[in-house]
Image (spheres, rainbow, N blue to C red):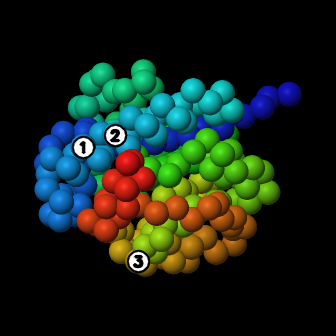
Amino acid sequence: MNVERPTLVVMAKLPVAGAVKSRLAAEVGVAEATRFYRTTLRRTLMRLSPDRRWRTVLAVAPDRSARWAWPCGVPACPQGRGDLGRRMQRIMDAIPPGPVVIVGSDIPGIRPRHIASAFRLLGRSDAVFGPAEDGGYWLVGLRRRPRVPQIFDSVRWSSDHALADTLANCQGLSVGFAATLPDVDTAAGWRAWRRLEG
């Protein structure tokens, strides 16, 4: 019996000053926004990549950074060109057979239990979303059987419409929902993260 192995894809940008968390940097400064991103990316990979229930792949931008030494020895592939939806669709189309879950690298609350729950949901749903508190989503997954659906067209990214727009593209698909987690795009979210850091 051929068991298709689940794949977790972590979307990441090369964590250099001025290239990450631009909205947050406008409020707290480039140095603090970059520190947040580097810390969260490293911790996300340290928590999720050792789990043997799935294989973990980094989808990186810019594409040339796929040759860079990413943390934790996780294999990296380029995201490619286009908006976020085009890049995520490219990943969904290219990964070997099996369910795929994509997460961002700037969600401090992600734990292995969240990923395991998303893959369980894909056992009975065609798609799964992890809503973010701002109207977007921190996780999207597709079962990808019997085909890979096209769900990322005409989505208003970086807005409170992102989840609703993507769900509108899921007509005819069964959809499950994972936990709602906060992302950190504003000074208020960053301050809450700093308080938890102690």
Disc on res. 81: none
Which residue is found at the position 56% from the left and 40% from the top? Answer: 8
Amino acid type, callout 3: Asp
Q: Please identify, in this view, whether the residue under mark 3 or under mark 2 is nearer the observer.
A: 2
Q: Amino acid at mark 2?
A: Thr
Residue drawn where x is 66% and y is 46% of the image: 113
Work out whether residue 26 or residue 6 is closer to the camera in this orientation and state it.
26
Q: Residue furthest front?
A: 198
Amino acid type, label 1: Arg
Q: Are marks 1 and 2 in contact (CB under 8 Å)?
A: yes
Q: What residue is shown with label 2?
A: 39
Mark 3, residue position: 160
Image position of 192 (left or right of 50): left
Q: Is residue 172 visible?
A: yes
- Which element type, helix, strand or loop, lies under badge 3? loop
Q: Which residue is mark 1?
A: 35
